[in-house]
Image: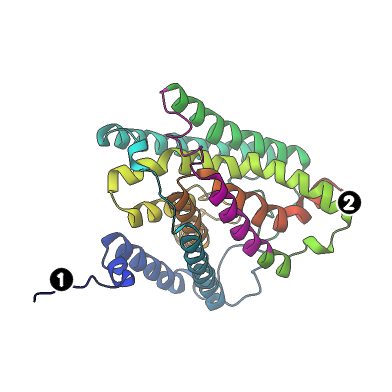
Amino acid sequence: MPTSPRSAPWLIQLLRQRSVQIAILLWLAASLAVFPLSGGKLPFNRPLLNNLPLVAQIIAPVIVLAIVFVEMAITYFLTRRRVLPDVAARAPEPAVARREVLLLWLYAAAVLLVGRWLGLHFFGEGIGLHLNGSLFGHTREVSPREVWAWAAYNFLFLAIIPYAVFRARGYSREALNLKSNNLKNDTLVILVVMAIGVAFDLAGGGFLKLSAHQMLFGGALTFFTHLLGTGLPVMVFIYAILFPRYLKLTSSAAATVILGALSYAALHIFEYWTLYDSLPHALLSVIFVLLTFFPPGLMKSYLTLRTANAWVHLWGYHAITPHVTADTPMLVHIFNIQ
């Protein structure tokens, strides 16, 4: 009696996908290119990493990537019984989706370039998706005025305006991945993923060294400013608007998750520690933006894929961890909270 052929294990199927193969090759090529470009020493000033050897700074993102894969597996386990909506159906037909994606990225490029110019003009450093000092230690003093300008600029141009435009074009909150179809399971995923991130952050950060008053008021201030300055812009621009269109255009979950991760990295192209004063420095900046932000971008994308809800990644993997748990000491310093 003939038997039906057994399907290949899921990992083999995943590795056979062209988008995954390209991502692996891109990661390896970027990592290897660091050595000839850097001459053995990185030009960036990232105080918390400056004392690490070059090899350690290349390996560190690989460790983060491994942790992300574990978190993705946990997310899959938590959502395995869900019936997920067709996220691709939330996007318009391919020709319109392609045009919207192109126009969105042209708009984003303009926002990032103008933000860089305005920041350099008024504060001596461009406006990026993170404040100077976020995650890697500060390289100069940041004023409260700069914090509010950064938060207002990113919130207005990367969240409010794109959201308003697409709502005016007739897209519902559900079509923008902003409505839960399983609140109970979404909440479970948020709490579990958040707990993992908070545990890592508190083990290695300075949050627990703050006073109760600093934790309370500094934490609330950090939550609010970073929600405006980076959390909501990322959620709206990538995971509410671009993500369904990527899925429509690729018809591939793996390719969509990878494109979401690359998009997340792309929005960080003008981080405060990047340098674009020479071709080698520019290439190294792009490489380390990719190595640094591609892994968390993968997790944000996978959370959105498995829940069809952009809010899940914001609450579980961005707003509290890493920003409140890691960046509150920075805001306490900036605003002199005693």
How is the protein colored in the picture?
rainbow
Q: Is residue 192 positioned above or below 122 on the image? A: below
From the viewer's perspective, tell me whether residue 123 is left or right of residue 106. right
Residue at 34 percent of width and 46 percent of height: 247
Say the numbered circle drawn on residue 213: 2
From the viewer's perspective, tell me whether residue 178 is left or right of residue 98. right
State the residue lying farthest toward the left.
1
- Whole-percent x, y for residue 78 in the image: 51, 60
Q: Is disc 1 surrounded by few (<14), some (14 to 19) or many (20+) residues within 10 Å?
A: few
Q: Which residue is mark 1?
A: 4
Helix, strand or loop status at disc 2: helix
Range of magenta residues: 169-198
- Whole-percent x, y for residue 280 in the image: 45, 62
Q: Is residue 8 positioned above or below 166 on the image? A: below
- The residues tagged by marks 2 and 1 sit, at their Cα atoms, a distance apart of 65 Å
Helix, strand or loop status at disc 1: loop
Residue 91 visible, this angle: yes
Looking at numbered disc 2 in the image, what kind of residue is underneath it? His
